[in-house]
Image (spheres, rainbow, N blue to C red):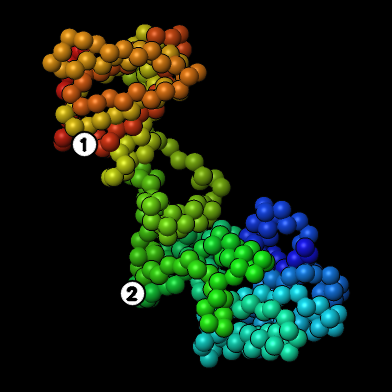
Amino acid sequence: MKILVTGANGFIGKNLIAQLKNQNYTDILAYDIDTDPALLDEYAEQCDFVYHLAGVNRPKNPDAFMRGNFGFTSELLKALERHGNKAPVMLASSVQAELNNPYGKSKRAGEELLLRYGKDNGVRVLVYRFPNVFGKWCRPNYNSVVATFCYQIARDLPIRIDNPDTILHLVYIDDVAAELIRALSGNETHKGQFCTVPVGYSVSLGQLAKLITGFREQRITLGVPDCSQPLEKKLYSTYLTYLPEEHFSYPLKANTDERGSFTEFIRTPDRGQFSVNVTKPGVTKGNHWHHTKTEKFLVVSGNALIQLRKTDSDRIAEYIVSGEQPQVVDIPPGYTHNIKNIGETDLVTLMWANEPFDPQNPDTYYQKV
């Protein structure tokens, strides 16, 4: 199948083409503003499906809206018609087509032209009125508030909010690409005479800013997003793509002494605390117990002896564990426990506790195993 994609170098175009290739659609006819115009006629003759994503968003002259959003659509459809090519055509329109501003009028004109073309020629046409689309590779300070907020906040630059109660309607680029690929096989999602992305989100401008600002602060608090919330998960993935490359990494505080080190990695209010514990050869750490706190130990490098004893018993349970054969050892409440490096190299253990450490309520009591 030969697939023509106009606006191939744009935000939606780049993401769609990448996902098409991931799904083994390799015969892609990519057309963009800097493509040789003569290729449009050639592609219009060859293609089996058209993703018409090209358009004008913010021209210097308002007249360019109609030329870019209506005029080029007319050129494309005339080329298809000239070759008698009845390939289905998908059009990327906008919810602003309902408005009477220059951009909305040009989008609506493009829609009407395509719908009339489909009716006159017996061609399947698909018009998508997209709301705000967000995700990786979107241009900041252009036409996406999400991209702008992510870019500015990632660089500690100020953001502008005129009305924090303004409600935004968002769709995520991967959900857009998935819907458009379904359209290839006739499984598009209809909403009246238009098509739609079935997964969408509504959020206030103020809440959006709060979420994205929170992602920046999590590097200090060691928090992570609530990935059970789809919008938060997708916004966080988007935010990371706007970090300057020199800021991909960030330091952690290592608590170090002669026995080794203990470094907290992630701290969450509902999923506990994740840490890395390094123990020098021959050193034993622990010898304490908890009333409610639970832990998991996972040795990833070195060899260890983990001992546990119920506080009112003399019987000791022992586990010899190694990074070469990973296994988790659960530490139940009411059991005093320790971990000893029985190897000749540093022992590295990933540790999880079901609650972040609270110095005001440590729930930790010394008692040798």
Say left or right for 368 vs 165: left
Q: Residue at x 42, y 23 (%)?
A: 327
Which residue is at the front of the view, 208 or 305?
305
Helix, strand or loop under label 1 = loop
Residue in the picture at 16% in, 35% down: 361
Figure quadrant of the N terminus: bottom right
Horizontal and vertical percent position of residue 351: 35, 28
**Residue 123, x across and y down, in percent:** 72, 81
Residue displayed at 55% across by 76% down:
190
Residue 254 appears in view? no
Q: Quadrant location of residue 349?
A: top left
The amino acid at mark 1 is Asp
Which residue is the site of mark 2?
A: 165
In the orientation shown, which residue stands out farthest toward the left?
A: 312
Within 10 Å of the Cα at label 1, are there few (<14), some (14-19), or many (20+) other Cα atoms? few
Identify the residue shown where x is 66% and y is 82%: 69
* Residue ID for mark 1: 358
Q: Is residue 304 visible?
A: yes
Q: Secondary structure at mark 2?
A: loop
In the image, 238 versus 88, the foreground residue is: 88
Give the percent coordinates (x, y) of residue 73. 72, 82
Give amino acid for label 2. Answer: Asp
